[in-house]
Every structure is written in C-alpha cells, then in structure tokens.
Image: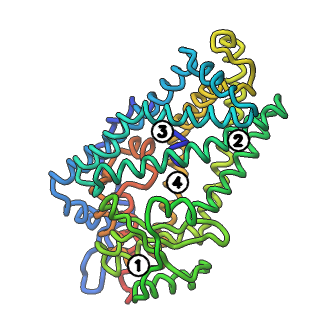
C-alpha cells in the first residue's frame, strides 16, 4: 500500500549539496587499561574505510539516483492526473461507469480503471527502476516473470483495496458534503489502523513465504530478548526475501494479536549470530519504544492536515475550472484526479518531515538495540553490509531531505560512542 501514498521541486535544488567539514569529535579519546586509546570518530572511519573506492562510488551512485527517481515518479503521477482532467478522460470514464446502476459500483469501477490506466502509463518507468536498474547494480535476484508477478499483485491490491476505499469515501462525501474532509479523515484513519492490523498476516504473505523459524540457538536468543523486554510473542518467522534481492532485513510488525517478529533468509545466511542478535534487538526496540503507535499517531495528524489542505485547495480550484473540467462538486468522482494531485503534492512536500520523524525513531531503536545486544561491533558490521545500496556519508541537508534512516556513518558513530562508554565491561 505504500505505493498509494506517493511521497517525496525544492528537493531537486538540494540533491547535490554536501558538507565537506568533518564532524566534530564530541567524545574525546577514551583510555583503556594499558593506556590504549579508543576514539569513536577514528573507529567509525576504520569501518567506513573497509569499503573500496569503487564500492563507495557505486553505492553513492545508486542511492543518489533514487533522488531523481522520486522526483520523476512525483511528476509522472501529477501529469497522469492532469491528463485525466484536461483531456476529458475523467468525464469519459465516469460516463462509461454510469452504465452500471448503483453509484457505489460506478465509483468503484472508476477508481479501478484509474489505477489500471495509471499502472500502464507508469509501467515504462517502473520497469526501469524496479527491474533493469536493480539488475544493473546487482541488487535483484528476480527474473522478469517473478518481478512482473509481484507488480500485478500490487496492482490487484490497489484495485481491490484502493477501489473500495475510494468508493466508500465518496459515499461518505455524498452524505455529508460540506464536512466531507472531517468524515473522510475519520474513515481514512480507521483504514490505516485496519491495514496495520492485517498487513503482517494477510498482505505480506502475498509477496513472500513466511514460516516459523526452526528451533535453533538464534531463535531461542531472539525470544529470550523479546521476553526480557516485554514483547508479547512466542514465535519468530522467517521469510524468503532472497527471491527478490540480497538485502538483509527484519521487522516487528502488527498491533495487538497480529504482532510478528520476522527476519529474512538473507540475514540468516549472511549474518553472524552476533549480527543477527544486534539487528533483532534493534527491531524489538521499535515495539518496546512504542514506535508503531507513535508513527501511527504522527501519520494520523499528517493525514488530517492533508485532508484540510485538499478541502481548501479543491474548493478554490473547482470554482475556477469547474466548467472546463466538468466537475459538478466535491462528491463528483470526476474530480478524483484533482484530489490525487493535491494529495500527492502534500505528501511530496511533507516527505522530509516524515523522514525526520522516522529517522529519530531509528536512532532511538539503534541505541535500544545496542544496550540489549551489547554488540556495537556486530551492529557496525551489519550497517556496512547495508552499504551496497545506502550512501554511507551524505551531507547534512542531503540526509535531512532524503534519508528515512540515519546515515551509515551516523549509526556507526553512535554505537562507537556507546562502546567508548563501556570499554571496561566484561
């Protein structure tokens, strides 16, 4: 469902900005027994230096390319919606849908066709960014059939869930009219919570196979950390992300009875026991620190502001272009492309703020994880494994605008500072 919220022209202006100043050494050298000196900045640089210049250049190039891709995706979504409005395609689709008797079904069909046509129009860009580019950087394990199958699954979810969402939303709008955005927000908030609830159990398994992790020392250690920190799970799940890529990942998803601890087979195959423990301690931190609920609350506030913005801008625009676009009012499905433009624009501008909130939570989870696992070096070595597709050392403004996780350098420095304060522990 992430594809439904297209987030992330101001950004373009700053995409090449970087800062050449070295970070100040906020923690001085730490003396160990035997007069050895441990400097967090120096130790961090040692990790960064394990990347060859060629590897660093390739990683930077891949990650920086995503800045432009985000811009092109945003512009393409706006252009597609504008085509629907300006060329009369939206009115034509509404007339075709009106051959069906009930308005609810008409709106569902309109939304379904909109998603399908958008999928077709964006397919050339998607096939480049999702398939050819991933293979160019050796990040994909999928053949075209497998990749296209996942794309069709995503389209089906958009058509079914997105179509139902829009049809119900317009049914609400028809009932309340002037206060549509408040009731529309309440409905959207309920849908967000519903998706969070069902995602681990019903949506994620559509794309990967999930199975209980075999009983091993690794599983026992993960469950032990979970019990010690009050995470109410009695199993750990493994999923076959290797069918898509070599990326390592793990998560603690869901709310209430659907909470799941999951890690992918790449982490199991590529990580040492200490690295797996460090990663899973980080993921458990998200649950213990209530990041799922905090993030949901933040998104609910943001969506409320978005609905308020759309309500204001939509009314202004249809007053001026009502006859040209053939939109009779806010409850007219013909105006859906205009609403999509406004939603996309809002979240594109809000993207750096969203990234900052997530980045703060990731920093908190890093510190929680290293305090639980007591393995700063294992965490640092795992971050270096992520460097194949994440730029390690961006500029400050670049990190603010584009990073939803702290940069690799920031994360390693953080755990090296932790290590500096715990040198005498055994």
> Disc 1 or 2, which lies upstream in sequence?
1
Which residue is the site of mark 4?
Answer: 358
- The residue where tag 2 is placed is 304
Label ID, residue 277: 1
Residue at the spot 34% in from the left edge and 58% down from the top edge: 244
- Sequence-wise, which precedes: disc 4 or disc 3? 3
Where disc 2 sits, the SS reads helix
Q: Quadrant of the C terminus?
A: bottom left
Q: Who comes first in sequence, dot 4 or dot 2?
A: 2
Q: Give the Cα separation between the discs numbered 4 and 1.
A: 22 Å
The residue carrying mark 3 is 8
How far apart marks 4 and 2 lie (CA) works out to 19 Å
Residue 11 against residue 203 in the figure, above or below: above
Asked whether the viewer can see residue 393, the reply is no
**Closer to us: 352 or 159:** 159
Q: Secondary structure at mark 1?
A: helix
- Quadrant of the rendered image containing residue 336: top right
């Amino acid at each position: 469902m992430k594809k439904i919220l297209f987030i992330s022209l101001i950004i373009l202006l700053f995409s090449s900005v970087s800062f050449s100043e070295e970070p100040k050494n906020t923690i001085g050298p730490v003396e160990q027994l035997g007069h050895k000196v441990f400097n967090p900045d120096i130790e961090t640089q040692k990790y960064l230096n394990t990347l060859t210049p060629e590897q660093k250049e390739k990683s930077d190039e891949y990650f920086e390319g995503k800045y432009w891709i985000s811009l092109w995706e945003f512009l393409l979504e706006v252009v597609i919606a504008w085509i629907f409005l300006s060329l009369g395609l939206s009115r034509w689709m509404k007339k075709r849908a009106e051959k069906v008797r009930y308005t609810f079904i008409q709106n569902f069909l309109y939304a379904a066709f909109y998603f399908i046509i958008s999928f077709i129009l964006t397919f050339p860009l998607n096939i480049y960014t999702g398939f050819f580019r991933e293979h160019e950087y050796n990040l994909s394990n999928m053949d075209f059939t497998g990749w296209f199958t996942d794309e069709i699954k995503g389209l089906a979810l958009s058509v079914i869930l997105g179509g139902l969402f829009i049809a119900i939303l317009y049914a609400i709008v028809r009932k309340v009219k002037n206060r549509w955005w408040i009731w529309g927000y309440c409905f959207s908030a309920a849908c967000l919570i519903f998706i969070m609830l069902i995602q681990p159990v019903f949506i994620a398994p559509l794309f990967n196979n999930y199975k209980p992790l075999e009983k091993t020392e690794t599983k026992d250690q993960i469950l032990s950390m979970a019990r010690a920190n009050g995470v109410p799970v009695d199993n750990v799940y493994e999923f076959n992300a290797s069918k898509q890529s070599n990326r390592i990942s793990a998560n603690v998803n869901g709310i209430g009875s659907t909470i799941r601890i999951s890690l992918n087979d790449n982490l199991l195959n590529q990580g040492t026991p200490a690295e797996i423990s460090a990663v899973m301690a980080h993921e458990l931190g998200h649950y213990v620190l209530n990041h799922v609920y905090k993030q949901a609350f933040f998104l609910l506030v943001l969506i409320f502001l978005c609905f308020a913005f759309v309500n204001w801008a939509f009314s202004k625009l249809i007053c001026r272009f009502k006859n040209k676009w053939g939109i009779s009012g806010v409850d007219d499905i013909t105006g859906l492309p205009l609403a999509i433009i406004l939603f996309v624009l809002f979240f594109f501008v809000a993207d750096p703020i969203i990234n900052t909130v997530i980045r703060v939570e990731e920093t908190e989870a890093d510190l929680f994880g290293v305090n639980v696992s007591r393995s700063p070096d294992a965490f640092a070595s795992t971050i270096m494994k992520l460097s194949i597709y994440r730029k390690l050392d961006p500029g400050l403004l670049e990190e603010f605008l584009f990073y939803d996780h702290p940069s690799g350098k920031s994360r390693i420095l953080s755990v090296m500072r932790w290590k500096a304060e715990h040198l005498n522990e055994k």
